Image (cartoon, rainbow, N blue to C red):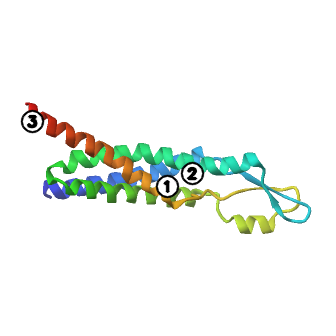
Amino acid sequence: MSERTRGVVVFSGGLVVAGLFAGMLWHLLSAPPNYTIGDDHGAIITEQGLSQAFAMDIWFLFIGMAVGLAVGAGGWLLFHRTGWPVVLIVIVGALAAGLVAWLFGQWLGPHGFADRVVAAEPGDRVPMDLQLHSLWLLLVWPLAANLPVLGLALWNQFRRSHG
């Protein structure tokens, strides 16, 4: 196996592991709010519950920033000799890790909110599904991943010109 092929395999495997870890972390840190089922079988959420729904997105954002930085650093270490394509590799890789995290976190649940609400009785509390409320948050992952690439490329350029 060539060095480049080994790098692709290691990077791809790392992306899957990072995505699964991030999805599990998102699931553990996010506390989906509860809806309370009223006497008329309507689902009611409090203002605090709405802020918890927003917090699910914020946790995904923070996790995406951290994992994105790690993906960028790893991508640079493995592929910096390829030149400018390292940017594309890191963008695609970070987006892939973000998609894995999103899908795995949702799979861990809770999910099936509509079915749970239909089966609930008045007074029951039904947690919201773990979900992103804005898919644009996935873009944080590749943006964060490019920060180490930019910084390390500038550092290498500085060293060449002053060393």
Q: Label for residue 137? A: 1
Q: Amino acid at mark 1?
A: Leu
Name the amino acid type tagged 2. Asp
Q: Measured along the vertical axis of the image, is residue 9 above or below residue 69?
A: below
Placement of the N terminus among the 4 image quadrants: bottom left
Residue plotted at (33% across, 60% down) = 92
Alpha carbon of mark 3 to alpha carbon of mark 2: how far?
A: 43 Å
**Decide: marks 3, 2 in contact (CB < 8 A)?**
no
Q: Is residue 145 left or right of residue 50?
A: left
CB contact under 8 Å: marks 1 and 2: yes
Return the residue at label 2: 57
Secondary structure, mark 3, is helix
The label nearer to you, 3 versus 2, is: 3
Q: Which residue is the site of mark 3?
A: 161
The secondary element bearing badge 2 is classed as: helix
The x and y percentages for residue 12 are: 31, 57
The amino acid type found where label 3 is placed reads: Ser
Q: Which of pointers 3 and 2 lies earlier in the amino acid sequence? A: 2
Residue visible at 32% across and 44% down?
Answer: 147
The image's mark for residue 160 is: none
Residue at x 32%, y 48% (from the top left corner):
146
Q: Residues within 10 Å of mark 2 (few under 14, many from 20)?
A: many
Label 3 to label 1, Cα distance in Å?
38 Å
From the image, which quarter does the C terminus lie in?
top left
Q: Earlier in the sequence, mark 1 or mark 2?
A: 2
Occupied quadrant, residue 96 = bottom left
| In-front residue for pair 130/110 | 130
**Mark 1: few, some, or many residues within 10 Å (few <14, many ≥20)?**
some
The quadrant where residue 13 appears: bottom left
* Residue 148 pos. (x, y %): 30, 42
Q: Residues within 10 Å of mark 3 (few under 14, many from 20)?
A: few
Comes first in the chain, label 3 or label 1: 1
